[in-house]
Amino acid sequence: MERSRIFSHTLKGALLLGALSGSLVQADAPYVAPATPQGTGPYPAIMVQEPNLPTHTVYRPARLDAAGMKKLPIIAWGNGACVNQGNRFRYFLTEIASNGFMAIAIGPLGPPDVETSLSSGDVRGKPSAVSPAAKRTADSPKIDYIPADTTAGQLTDAIDWAIAENSRPGSPYYGKLDTSRIAVMGQSCGGLQASAAARDPRVTALGVWNSGLFTDARRVMDIAAADAPKTMLPGLRIPSIYVTGDQTDQAFKNAEDDFAHVGGPSIRLWREQTGHKGTYREPNGGAFAPVAVAFLKWRLQDDQQAARMFIGPDCTLCKQPEWHLRIKNIN
């Protein structure tokens, strides 16, 4: 089988309990300041710490008045390992935003090494004030898992803020957001949070990356501060996508099972020679980013050309042997 398009990866570092962290990388992208426009899309994007949303980091086109740009659909993002660092998935989220979206990641801006470190355990930062980790004290009972530094409710907070900003006179986002098109997405632990937040009736699409629910709903609550029992999946009717690495990705089986049970139109993808940490910290988000962009363009912008990445007799991913694709409930 042809392998010329597959990146050569080397597994480095240890995985956290429950496999709740980062990515395999090809090479670190060079660091640039947050206000430097980046991304390969038509609207180079920046990373912004908004004064009235200090708990999150916003990714959006540098020019909100760019010619040809439509209203920006909204994406709320949960980080791997549920870390409270909004720049942890900078390359991946910047690439998405450069294609005409606003992405809001849980967590304030952290130091530059947050963006490239393989191990989330090295860059966890300070837990969110509302998180289970922040509420623990020296007298708290011992536990056998890493408590979440963030919560699924912070994805809802991101959505609330974006909708309010869209209607607030004087906001740079006034009238510029499409509040009828909202996705929740996340990687690993953040994917558990996204699954919980997907039950919000305002959410119109779900992206679960290197993640999948556990049969024991208590475990989801313990490690992700997310109320997401496996039994919710048949009733989840919005479009969804489940993306993992190959069978070495410890979330592979969870994603397979979620895809089998989710009730709405869904895509299942996995990529050979790719582990749990994906490609997020490769330049422009690596091979996972075009998949995310195409899914979001299709489901949040009604872009039928983007849909051809996944469906049709000549679908793009069908011709890339490193990718394995299944679909369900899609005509």
Image (cartoon, rainbow, N blue to C red):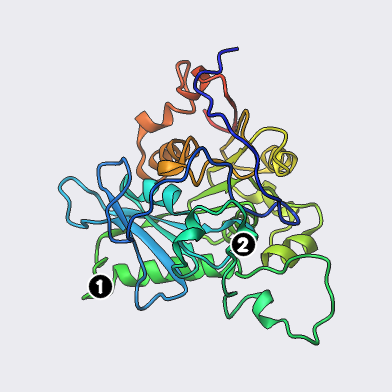
Q: Secondary structure at mark 1?
A: loop
Q: Amino acid at mark 2?
A: Asp
Q: Quadrant of residue 90?
A: bottom left
Q: Residue at x 43, y 36 (%)?
A: 290
Q: Is residue 71 in view from this perspective?
A: yes
Mark closer to the chain start, 2 or 1 = 2
Q: Decide which of 56, 314 is in the foreground and name it.
A: 56
- Farthest-out residue, bottom: 139
What is the x, y in percent for residue 310?
A: 49, 28
What is the x, y in percent for residue 298?
A: 41, 38
Disc 2: CA contacts within 10 A as few (<14), some (14-19) or many (>=20)? few
Seen in the image, is 275 located left or right of residue 102? right
Tell me if residue 34 comes above or below residue 233 in the rendering: below
Tell me if residue 236 comes above or below residue 112 in the rendering: above
Q: Quadrant of residue 42?
A: top left
Q: Which residue is mark 1?
A: 171
Q: Residue at x 75, y 53 (%)?
A: 231
Q: Which residue is mark 2?
A: 122
